[in-house]
Image: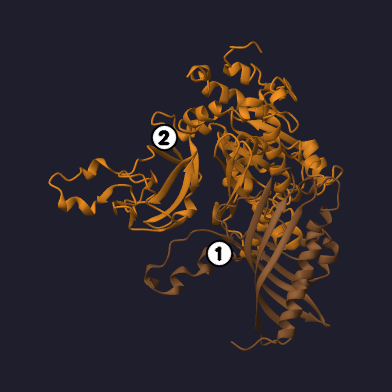
Amino acid sequence: MSTIDIQLQHRIEQFYYREAALLDKREYQQWLLMLAEDIHYVMPSRYSPQRDIEKRGQESFLALKDELESPSPATAPMREENIFTIALRADRAYKTNAWGFNPPARTRRIVGNVMIEVSENEKEYSVNSNFILYYSRHRNDNFIYSGQRNDTLRDYDGQLVVARREVILDWNVIEAPSVGLFF
Amino acid sequence: MATGHHFTVSDYVNDDASYIHRGVFTDERVYRRELERIFSCNWLYLCHESQLQKAGDFLTTFMGETPIIVALGHDGKLHASINSCRHRGLPVCRTDSGNAKRFVCPYHNWSYTVEGELSAVPQEKYLQNPPDKSSLGLKKVPRLESYRGLIFGSFNEHIESLDDYLGDQKFYLDLYFNRFPEGIEVIGEPHKWLLNANWKLPVENQLGDVAHGPYLHNSLIEKDSDAVHEINNHGLNCVAKAGHGAALRFMPEDSDPKDIAWGLEGFGMVMNPGMEQYLLEVQKSAASRIGEIGARCKGLTFGVYPNLSFLWSNSTLRVSHPRGPGQVEYWSWWVVPKDAPDDVKEALRINYNLLFGPAGMLEEEDSEAWTQQYIGSRIPDARDQRYYYGMGLGEDGNHPDLPGLVGSCFNEHYARQFYLRWRDEMDDIDKINVE
């Protein structure tokens, strides 16, 4: 693994902190500007599959990807969105009759473990990060989401944008009323 | 209410079910009774036949709170067993689905065939009197039957056939499950999520509660849109048999085939123009499979008593698994016409996971309503305020073309019929009150 320039690490971490701050402040319209117009935003569903006995004793026996249903004609992923559907969700937050946002979400995002991979395309970075998201709305209905984000960030005229995001949640049975939040 | 009065079912549901007591959704004793009288006595949906293809294929699910393994046996038959070892009760299967030769309990490695027979007890060779394995198989679900690939099980050995249980609801199920030339298939694993709501609220919603659409979901569904006008003008709530329901648009005889064919498209149509072509082709031949009347029906929501739902436009089957009076483990599966091209299937999936399911924009509003209804049902000083279920009372009746009792899509008779059946099945609830 090649060394990541500390300035690049700093730049990408600052990008994520700004993103988390905008989302926690409910400034979703500002946040949309951090996304590429051709963004793919996916959340595989996650289940408990039977393991391949041939792989016993090897790390691939427990491969995380075997638990995920990413978009394909043979799968049922949890989310597969584009800029249009993401914007639709963002717009709804500011309507008086979008009852899933009334009262509005109180969220707190902690993003960490930011790992950058150098890609062949020098204008794109593959970045893995972890998050904890605390979510509260009604009275004492509080939920904690934990997961991983696998992003492709694109350097677009000196500005970073999210070109692809895969969100992997750590539940089998989801314990929160919605996973339609912005992760 | 006078002190010492024991609630009877009539206090919970009045004689025409126009008033429903809040305790129906919250009382622990009602819930315990439901597990015995509703979930252990009726046909419950297990899975679709497309999910089990080869001998040894299995999946795990629930009947009420009871964990179940459904497997295709080496005898070519379906088997459903309780996922709990006869020795100390641990689950013998720990995965959601797969293909197995044996299910092995982790504790002492008792192992079972996929058909549920006890095949090995490793310690038996050290015993003088080994256990009689033939009597120690997993507890079987005694009745398994299917209709159009939908597999149901029942713990009630004496229950009527699934065919009789569904009755004329088969006509309504056929509208979707027999509409397509090669039938339908379930793709992928189910989505599963917990909601702090009573299990009957999601069921009731999808038995025929079309009326809430442009109100609860007004941020997405305009009251003045063509789609809403079509529902207002042609929407019907059909109850083939108490407890089942079918909400649909019954389109006029002279309708343009396009106006009837659509109804599955939603957002997907915007994403994929190829869907239009596919659905129109299906519509052209639909009458040959489901009759002229059937081919004029554009479905909305369907329910099979007690806890199976199907959403037409959103390509999803769902089951409301009870987890106590105030919690439901809701499961949804993606279901599509088997012969549809992959890109059409994927376009249909947008309606499934963008609008419904745990990330669904519409469903997050439904689950909001269901969880808030549960909170409302627990208000101590409102216990004397029964819910009004009388919308459209007396306004339903026979229909010249469609089976069962039919009312407008604003008529809550689908819910009244559900709760009248529920009342019948819960009948001697006052007995457990004395315990």
B68 or B90: nearer the viewer:
B90
Q: Say yes or no: labels 2 and 1 on the same chain.
A: no
Query: x, y (%) of residue B54?
Result: 40, 58
Tell which subunit mark 2 falls on. B
Query: x, y (%) of residue A85?
Result: 77, 60
A123 lies left or right of B82: right
In the displayed structure, B175 sits above or below A44; it is: above
Tag 1 residue: A68
Q: Secondary structure at mark 2?
A: loop
Identify the residue at image location x=71%, y=48%. B364
B230 lies left or right of B101: right
Query: x, y (%) of residue B171?
Result: 58, 37
In the displayed structure, A177 sits above or below B251; it is: below
Disc ID at residue B155: 2
Identify the residue at image location x=42%, y=48%. B70
| Category of crowding for the residue at label 2, using alpha-carbon neighbours closer than 10 angstroms: few (below 14), some (14–19), many (at least 20) | some
Query: x, y (%) of residue A64?
Result: 52, 68
- Quadrant position of the N terminus of chain B in the picture: top right
B159 or A137: nearer the viewer:
A137
Give the letter of the orange chain: B
Tell me the kind of residue under disc 2: Phe
How far apart in space, not on screen, are marks 2 and 1 (Cα)? 33 Å
Tell me the kind of residue under disc 1: Leu
Mark closer to the observer (2, 1):
1
- Colour that chain A carries in the picture: brown
In the displayed structure, A51 sits above or below B126; it is: below
